[in-house]
Amino acid sequence: ICSAAPSPVNMSGGKLYVKESALQILQKIEQPVVVVAVVGLYRTGKSYLMNRLAGKQTGFALGSTIESKTKGIWMWCVPHPTKAGTTLVLLDTEGLGDVDKGDSKHDSNIFCLAVLLSSTLVYNSRGTIDNRAVEELQYVTELTECIKVKSSNNEADDSGEFVKFFPSFIWAVRDFTLERKIYGNDATEDEYLEFALKLKVGTSKKVMEYNLPRECIQNYFPSRKCFTFPFPTAPENVSRLEKLDSADISSDFLEVTENFCKYAFEKSEVKKLKDGIIVSGRVLGHLAKNYVDTISSGVVPCLENAVIAMAKIENEAAVKDGLEIYQSGMEKLKDTFPLELKNVSSEHQHLSSTATQTFMKRSFRDNDGGYLKTLEEKINKLFDEYLRQNEEASKRQCEDLLSVLSGPMTEKLKQGFYAKPGGYDLFCKDLEDIVKNYNSQANKEVKAEEVLEEFLKQKSVDSKAILHADKKLTEKEKKIKEETEKAVLLEQEIKVKEEKQRQLEEKMEAERKSNEERMRQMKEKMDEEIKLQREEAERAMDSKLREQAALLEKGFKEKADRMKEEMEEFKRQNAEAESNRAREFAEIKDTLLNYMVFHIRT
């Protein structure tokens, strides 16, 4: 994954599709991903920035002619240079506005995909951030037509929620030659950007058209940053920029490039879905395919539907992963059967907990606990089967032990050793010795008492025959001994029932502890999801507050008031979402507890 991968998104028959080779690369990435995508007009040097972020001189193709070099979206995956345990995914997009394509809808789709897939979006342009440059970013104004947040409000404008999951925004201005001054005063790059995005007062059509792309950038993206790059080298060397030594490149250009990369590494967040769900490489692959297939079918991609689709894929896989962990461990334990029930139960609890951890790590949005319940049902079914197999192994071992211990008695019976006066007492003494030796050797076997009961029942047939034939005993003595033998058999029957009850209680206790641990992990998972949801809402609220303050400062009171109303509704929805999650947890807990009680009873 450390080399340039085939373009993950390409064209076939005029439609976008995801390349299988790219999905295979992403499928292997279990780590969270930071996704940096670069968009902009063709032939503006986007690929050079991506190569610098990858820490390489070459990788993404750089063109040296007026023809656009990058087609579709190209991907490069590298270990993140500053965030341990994280993968940096770089997306280099096809240049916008390529005259050879003649399809503005295709450009909108590429831009839309870059927004949907990235955690940081770099917009690359040349010259200055003037009105023409902002107008070239027309695709941002089309996002409300290209993206939906919820599936239930097809007619409503839900763009107010874009800020919750849209990437941070970096404007990279290439070949910048002007002085950064505002009203004669020196300005920082960020001040220069904000000045370029300043709204005009008025309600005329011309003013509204001027303000629209600026309002979209301000309202949709949670943070904005600007870098102005001077010319990198002499004009005649630009076409072979990737082959130049650093000595042949402007030191100012290299300094800005270094600052750009440092900022992108430090400030780019891990990619998250709606509600703060962290995205791994594997999920990013599913996400890309979902979005591309949706766009190619002519349907507007919906964030809520994408999350539901991802949740189904990941939750089904999470159940499978959890079961594999449990079954693999129990299969190893099975090689040592028969074992005491407490040993099997202890390993069951440990593996059940590990399986649940594995499930929790991969699953998300299991709102009704259905997938967790499925995991529990399958684990309990497997547990019952392993208990049965342990009992079968125990039964065989106990039967083999009794067969060995009773071998001499069997031989004596064949030889008629007990068919003589006093033979019954001899038989009883031999039987007592067999039981004593058996109990000392098989007392920890789960089937010890049950197998012994069956053995004693079988031997009672021989016992009765020997008793009735023993001429040394009077009829009265025979009746007493017969009653004594019945008492012994009854006592053994009681022992078997008590042992079965004890084992049932031990099994119930094991399942109760497993269920408690499952509940604890689920609560922990849900608390983490609520925390991420809250953090997402807070980031979005902070962004809206900044924009509202800026509107008030610049005299846009009406717009600021509308934003205030929007924020109040935003707060209400977030509070309602948290309340719903708490209610869902209570319902899931009741469902799983009811299932456990039903399972134990049956």
Image (cartoon, rainbow, N blue to C red):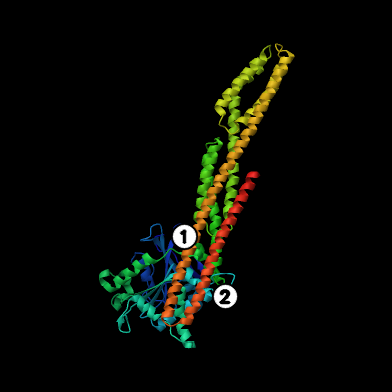
Give the SS element for disc 1. loop
Q: Quadrant of the C terminus?
A: top right
Q: Gap between marks 1 and 2, in whole Å?
A: 31 Å
1 or 2: tag closer to the N-terminus: 2
| Location of residue 66 (image quadrant) | bottom left
Residue receiving disc 1? 280
Q: Amino acid at mark 1?
A: Ser
Res 53 visible: yes
Image point (27%, 69%), residue name: 246
Of residues 246 and 369, the one drawn nearer to the viewer in this rendering: 369
Closer to viewer: mark 1 or mark 2: 2
What residue is rendered at 38% in x and 57% in y? 84
Residue type highlighted by circle 2: Ala
Residue 112 disc label: none
Residue 166 in view (yes/no): no
* Extreme-left residue of the structure: 247
Residue labelled with disc 2: 156
Q: Nearer the viewer, residue 25 or 189?
A: 189
Quadrant of image for the N terminus: bottom left
Residue lying at the far right in this picture: please name it. 475
How many marks are shown on the rendered structure? Answer: 2
Residue 489: image x %, image y %? 67, 26
What residue is at 60 percent from the left and 46 percent from the top? Answer: 381
Q: Is residue 231 left or right of residue 533?
A: left
Neighbour class for label 1 at 10 Å: few (<14), some, many (≥20)?
many
Task: Say if 90 sits above or below 444 in the image.
Answer: below
Residue 18's x, y, as percent?
50, 66
Position in image of residue 428 (x %, y %):
64, 18
- Left or right of 265? Residue 335 is right
